[in-house]
Image: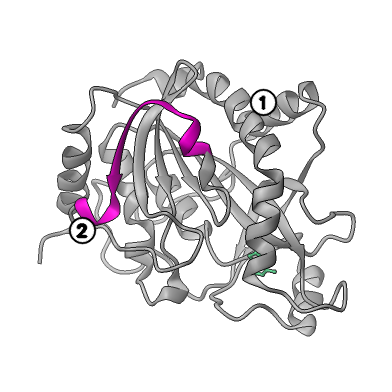
Amino acid sequence: MTDHYTLAETAAQSILQRTPLRPRIGLVLGSGLGSFADSLTETTKIPFREIPSFSLSTAIGHAGQTVIGKAGSVPVAVMQGRVHLYEGYSPQQVAFPIRVFRRMGIRAIILTNAAGGINLTYKQGALVLISDHINLQGNNPLAGPNDDRFGVRFPDMTHAYDKSYRESARDEARKLGMTLHEGVYAALLGPSYETPAEIRYLRTIGADLVGMSTVFEVIAARHMGIKVLAISCVTNMAAGILDKPLSHQEVMETGERVKTSFEALLRAVLPRMENDPDTAVQK
Ligand code: HPA
């Protein structure tokens, strides 16, 4: 079997040969948050099915394409949609697009997701910077033999969510007059939403948000030295808080409602990440 490094390299080349742009920043857009990609200029759109070794997203609300384009003057590579563990994909398949990003020359990523709000100070529609995570998915994309070409066997996760990017995001949110919270994201397997008892447990162990994505992507990114900014949209308060059932419909509708401010924040943060000296170095 061909190794993941070679597969990622092949996929990266197949994307790069279709665009003259050479982005150093990648984005992954979560459920209901994909429309940012529609606002880019000079775009090349590549359906996931046309990229070698890419898995196809089955979740509603995930377009399933890579868009290379410019956000203002900043070239970006966008995954409009992602695959999840609950779809039956392996942790390596979930993390694969991030490895492709790295082979494309990406040095920093913005991950977005829809999440349930556990922290009672959050409201539906709130945007939350992820400051740390708790991996409760029972697996890890780095499990198995380590490929040293990606990174070390035991990667540090102390500073997984880059502090200076978070500062930049807070700064830009302030300028835009937006409230931006900060919190800890717990990732569960899904696809069933949590029970109220599980939410009380998650609050006790220090989680502010709950979702079914992002963490494997962060682990794979840090393994390769990619810097990470991650932002959740609280599409619903977590189970048991408001005494009403949770639905994917509600998740999508909230994403739609906040997309204008979410996109404004992304657009404001990107130039600051582009000017980060770490991002500028091509390795
Ligand atoms: N739980 C898990 N994942 C989610 C939720 C939730 O309440 N909302 C959006 N994604």
At x 47% / y 75%, what residue is drawn? 86
The amino acid on which the numbered mark 1 sits, given as a three-letter code, is Ser
Residue 23 visible to an observer of this rendering = yes
First in sequence, mark 2 or 1: give its number: 2
Distance from disc 2 to disc 1, alpha carbons, whole Å, reads: 35 Å
Q: Which mark is residue 53?
A: 2
Q: Which mark is residue 168?
A: 1
Q: Position of residue 213 (x, y in %)?
A: 53, 62
Residue 187 sits in which quadrant? bottom right
Q: Position of residue 48 (x, y in %)?
A: 29, 53
Q: Position of residue 69 (x, y in %)?
A: 37, 28
At x 51% / y 59%, what residue is drawn? 61
At x 19% / y 33%, what residue is drawn? 18
Q: Residue 157 or 120: which is nearer the viewer?
A: 120
Give the magenta part as a residue range: 36-51
Q: Residue 153 or 164: which is nearer the viewer?
A: 164
Mark in the foreground, 2 or 1: 2
Quarter placement of the N terminus: bottom left
Residue 262 sits in which quadrant? top right
Q: Element at badge 1?
A: helix
Q: Residue 124 or 151: which is nearer the viewer?
A: 124
The amino acid on which the numbered mark 2 sits, given as a three-letter code, is Ser
